[in-house]
Image (cartoon, rainbow, N blue to C red):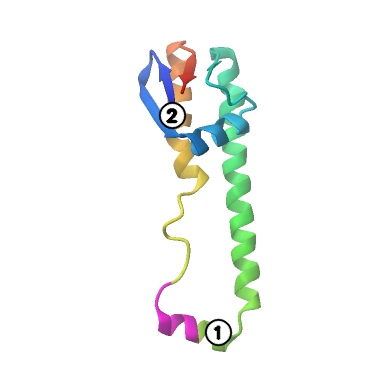
Amino acid sequence: MLYKFKSRSTADLILLEPHGRRLLQIIGKETGRAGIVTVAQIPAAVAALEAAVLDEERRAAAAQAQAKEAHTNAQADDAAEEGPQGDSDVVSLRQRAAPFIDMLRRSAQGGDDVVWGT
């Protein structure tokens, strides 16, 4: 299933269901088949998304620091010999939310609501 977000101020934004659902949950919207973010709701939605992005980044940095402390030098040497490790294939919330935040901001500037359907 896909979420298709629309606004008169921007091009359509299409997200896979899990990603669209997560963004809608962050802004406090029901994740049903259709909905609306009104112009009046956009500032709170953008603030919620930005706060969630910062929270995720803080948690990731704390987890990385904790993991770094837990490794011994020998384990770090073994990992270096095996090649680069990590979450390079993971798409962060910042990357997922950026197009939606842009859509919300441009819609607010244009005085247009954002609607979605599946």
Q: Looking at the image, which residue sits at the far left?
A: 11
Query: Magenta segment range?
Result: 78-84
**Quick one: which residue is furthest to the front in this view?**
1
Q: Amino acid at mark 2?
A: Asp
Apparent side of residue 90 relative to residue 44 in the rendered image (left or right): left
Mark 1 belongs to which amino acid?
Answer: Gln
**Label 2 element class:** helix
From the viewer's perspective, is the residue at label 2 or at label 1 nearer? Answer: 1
Residue 5 has which mark? none
Q: Is residue 29 magenta?
A: no
Considering only vertical position in the picture, is 39 above or below 104? above
Does residue 10 lie above or below 93 as drawn? Answer: above
- Which residue corresponds to the image point at 47% horizontal and 66% vertical from the top-left? 86
Q: Position of residue 17 (x, y in %)?
A: 48, 34
Residue tagged 1:
75
Q: Is residue 2 above or below residue 77?
A: above
* Residue placed under numbered mark 2 in the picture: 102
Q: Which x, y percent locates residue 27?
A: 61, 28
For residue 3, which quarter of the picture?
top left
Disc 1, SS: helix
| Residue positioned 42% across, 60% down in the render | 88
The quarter of the displayed image where residue 95 is located: top left
Q: Position of residue 51 (x, y in %)?
A: 62, 38
Mark 2: give few (<14), some (14-19) or many (20+) Cα within 10 Å.
Answer: few
For the point 61% across and 33% down, the residue is 26
Mark 1 neighbour class, 10 Å CA radius: few under 14, some 14 to 19, many 20 or more: few
